[in-house]
Amino acid sequence: MIVHLISFASSLHKPAQLRSSHEAVLSELEKYYTVKLINYQDMDQLSSDDFKVIFIATGGVERLVVQHFERLPRPAIILADGMQNSLAAALEISAWLRGRGMKSEILHGELPTIIQRIHILYNNFKAQRFLYGKRIGVIGSPSSWLVASNVDYLLAKRRWGIEYLDIPLQRVYDTFEQITDDEVGASCAAVASQALACREATPKDLIKAMRLYRAIKKISIEENLDALTLSCFKLIEQLDTTGCLALSLLNDEGIVAGCEGDLQSVFTLLATKALTGKGSFMANPSMINSRNNELILSHCTIGLKQAERYIIRNHFETERGIGIQGMLPTGDVTIVKCGGECLDEYYLSTGTLTENTNYINMCRTQVRIRMNTPTDYFLKNPLGNHHILVQGNYEDTLNEFFQSNSCKRTE
């Protein structure tokens, strides 16, 4: 982790004294990061991928910072240890910046607290850079029932730097037909051999599903996609197979993949991966018990690597193709959903996965969650159907990130 400190110091302060005047804070930073002191005159040499902190080394630099307003990193993270009247200057600078609509934060106080805060801000910065420029393929179109899950492509790009790219399903059909059964035989055998069981699905179903996976992966490579969402129900009639296995394997390989053309959920999957480094489970809230504060989430696909074991099934609604019944480990989980046409709203809560259920009238992968917050949100103020589950407690990490990007939390 490299922290670039853009230093502003008064002309009355000798450059040779900079280090000695701030030895305590600089030495502490260097225990955790590679610290590079950059004179404000050289800050244009840094790239957009460099993590930058404005280091107020002395008082009397307010006018100097103002003069370089357009060149300052955004948001403005200002470090001031208080030595050489630096805190007084930082307060004046922060007020001026905020008055011009620029977010700013002053790092000051106990050194462990400063280090902890820098770590959070660094992670937020890296997640933002991870998302910037990401290409999300919309293969087909959003399912007709996702009436509250629309995204404005232009607004989403302005806010997050992501790009949604429409890809017709016909391209999938054409690529699918070019892939032979023999090409996927070994892959089918590998998936089947690691399954706990194979129930309704046939070997022919598995071969078709694997051909679809190969077709979508080929298109993903050709289009340089980082993520995709698939209009999976529309292709069932054309190809007599489902996208559940394809999405499962793509997620395992690092291509974030969501169901039903859900634009909001695929972004949530991508943002969650940026912040946690983990794949996550896109699911329907299928049953809510308000008295016990429990929620059952279910869907017919999940990354095989997210599950401790899995069973090869057919697709629940259509009873065709391949579905995945994954058994997830019990323990802490986080539930998150991004909403709004420009992805500026979010729901976030934590809970405990207590059981993998097996109801016959729900999608194949099913988990019971004992929530840490009231389940009333789902019944009174939901951001839509699909929600995302990631294993582990990441509430603080996700909340800090969305808040730093001026998103509104829905509860």
Image (cartoon, rainbow, N blue to C red):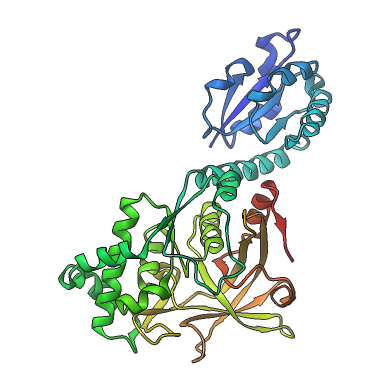
Q: Is residue 193 visible?
A: no
- Image point (65%, 34%), residue name: 74
- Image point (74%, 20%), residue name: 66
| Residue at far bottom of view | 360
Horizontal side, residue 6 vs residue 198: left or right: right
Percent across and percent down for residue 33 are 57, 35
Given residues 313 and 278, the one toward you in this image is: 313
Given residues 23 and 176, the one toward you in this image is: 176
Percent across and percent down for residue 224 are 36, 49
Is residue 114 depicted above or below 373 in this figure? Answer: above
Is residue 39 depicted above or below 317 in this figure? Answer: above
Horizontal side, residue 297 vs residue 109: left or right: left
Is residue 206 depicted above or below 268 in this figure? Answer: below
- Image point (51%, 56%), residue name: 270
Percent across and percent down for residue 251 are 41, 63
Q: Quadrant of residue 189?
A: bottom left
